[in-house]
Image (tube, helix red, strand yellow):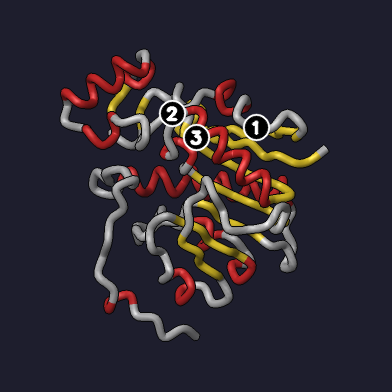
Amino acid sequence: MSSFNHASVPEQNSSYVQPNLLGLVSKLSLYARKRMVRSLLDLARPTPDTTVLDVGVTLDRREDCNFFEKAYPYPDRITAVGLEDASFLEQEFPGLKFVQANALDLPFADQSFDLVVSFAVIEHVGSRAQQRAFVQELCRVGKQVYIATPNRWYPVEFHTILPLIHWLPARWFRRILRLLGHDFWAKEANLNLLTLSEFKQLFPPDLTLYYRPTRLLGWVSNLSLFAVRR
């Protein structure tokens, strides 16, 4: 049993985690993410020997953050990568390995993992060109790749909790965010939402894609694509 003590570690918040609104956002987010994990397990059918890379872990300790490590049945087979220092995961999940690295330049050999996963990260890596580079890097190191991202056509934008304005052209959306004081989210480097067609175009053409939507209150809230080599 781990001797890791949560009380001994100061609470830290990631810039990329949305406001919680009295816990409601966290609960809805966790509900949707658990459904995504179930979908992933059904598609990938991992075993205790499956090597897994989780790209985009965070230092934030909110219940819906780093949820994959909590929900995955074999956390000791996970290598977790993030820009932020999430090394505490190694104490919380014995056997897990944390590597602090940039997802656009992963320090791993080609096809070195059986499964690569990433949840709600691709919308934060920058331009379409950077998003494509992110996808291609995950596909380089993984034999199977599962990537999930919020759906731009969901009526509420999850990071700002604002309705509908993200349906406007990007320059208008960003201008309104700046006027409302959301300077961080107004930058393309920090938030660049995707539609399903845009998402699919980021993957190499030699992969077979399986689409799995996640619905929240009747609408498709999250887009998930599972890529395998033909």
Label 3 – label 2 distance at C-alpha: 13 Å
- Indicate the position of residue 103 as horizontal and vertical percent values: 51, 49
- Indicate the position of residue 84 as horizontal and vertical percent values: 38, 58
Tell me the crowding category of disc 1: few under 14, some 14 to 19, or many 20 or more residues within 10 angstroms, Cα based. Answer: many
Residue bearing the label numbered 1: 203
Type of the residue with mark 1 = Phe
Residue 218 appears in the picture as rendered: no
Residue 162 higher or lower than 98, as above or below: above
**Nearest the eye: 52 or 133:** 133
**Nearest the eye: 79 or 75:** 79
Residue 146 appears in the picture as rendered: yes
Tell me the crowding category of disc 2: few under 14, some 14 to 19, or many 20 or more residues within 10 angstroms, Cα based. Answer: many
Figure quadrant of residue 223:
top right
Tell me the crowding category of disc 3: few under 14, some 14 to 19, or many 20 or more residues within 10 angstroms, Cα based. Answer: some
Type of the residue with mark 3 = Gln
Label 1 – label 3 distance at C-alpha: 12 Å
Label 1 – label 2 distance at C-alpha: 16 Å
At 72% from the left edge and 45% from the top edge, which residue is drawn?
43
Residue bearing the label numbered 2: 193
At 49% from the left edge and 34% from the top edge, which residue is drawn?
130
